[in-house]
Amino acid sequence: MKKLALLVSAALVSTSAAATGYYTDNKSDVKIKKNSDGNHVSVYQHSPGKYKGNSSKVLISYGSDYNDVDVSQYGKKNRSGVYIYGNSDHNYVTVGQKGYRNNSKVNIGYYADYNDVDVYQKGAFNYSTVSVKAGDWNKAKVKQKGNWNYSDVDILGENADHNKVKVKQYGDYSKSKVRIDDYYGGGTSYNKVHVRQSNNDYSNVYIANGSSYNHVYVSQY
């Protein structure tokens, strides 16, 4: 078992806008690979108003368990990607973004169980995707505040059971899509989905292919 604690700040990863293809003030890339357990990764990025913003990528791969990832971004435009793959269990991911445009992507893949994902976005335009493939007992929470909010949550794979998804959207226009599906073989059962939206809203929940005993709650105001 390998243990590692990482703190990445804007001062360490700051680059000029001309040096990055994404035109960001700050760019961070963290990789933890192969049977890496009990790691804590904390990324903090703050960009002045004259720059486009921040970009962060965290990769934890192959048999990585009990990892804690915390990403905080403040800037005009924020982009975060967290990727956990291959029998990675009991991981906890939090992403917080405040800016004009926020984009968050969380992928947990291939027999990933007991993972917890929490995303918070505040800005004019918020976009969040959470994908869990072939996993059980996972939890995903997305909270968005802004003029335009979009959330896409996928729980996919063989016997994707006992997963919980909560989406809260507050703003002038909100769109939420939740998909619980199986494309390997075996039903998706005992999943719970909660969607709450405040104004001018659209919600789509899709549960298919041998799905049983699922509960879906949608509240629109």
Image: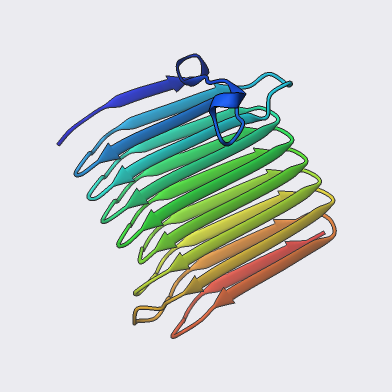
x then y, percent, for residue 130: 52, 55
55 in relation to 138, above or below:
above
Say which of 107 and 115 sits in front.
107
102 in relation to 40, above or below:
below
212 in relation to 23, above or below:
below
Q: Where does the N terminus fall, quadrant-wise?
A: top left
* Outermost residue, bottom side: 210
Say which of 191 and 24 sits in front.
24
Q: Where does the C terminus fall, quadrant-wise?
A: bottom right
x then y, percent, for residue 20: 54, 30
x then y, percent, for residue 59: 36, 42
Say which of 176 and 101 sits in front.
101
Residue at position x 60%, y 70% from top?
A: 216
Colour setup of the view: rainbow
62 in relation to 9, above or below:
below
Q: Would residue 220 be found to the left or right of residue 133 on screen?
A: right
* Outermost residue, front side: 18
Residue at position x 50%, y 71% from top?
A: 180
Can residue 25 be seen at all in this image of the molecule?
Answer: no
Find residue 138 and report its image quarter.
Answer: bottom left
Residue at position x 46%, y 54% from top?
A: 139
* Outermost residue, left side: 1
Q: Would residue 44 be found to the left or right of residue 115 on screen?
A: right
x then y, percent, for residue 64: 25, 45
Can residue 88 be seen at all in this image of the molecule?
Answer: yes
Residue at position x 29%, y 33% from top?
A: 39
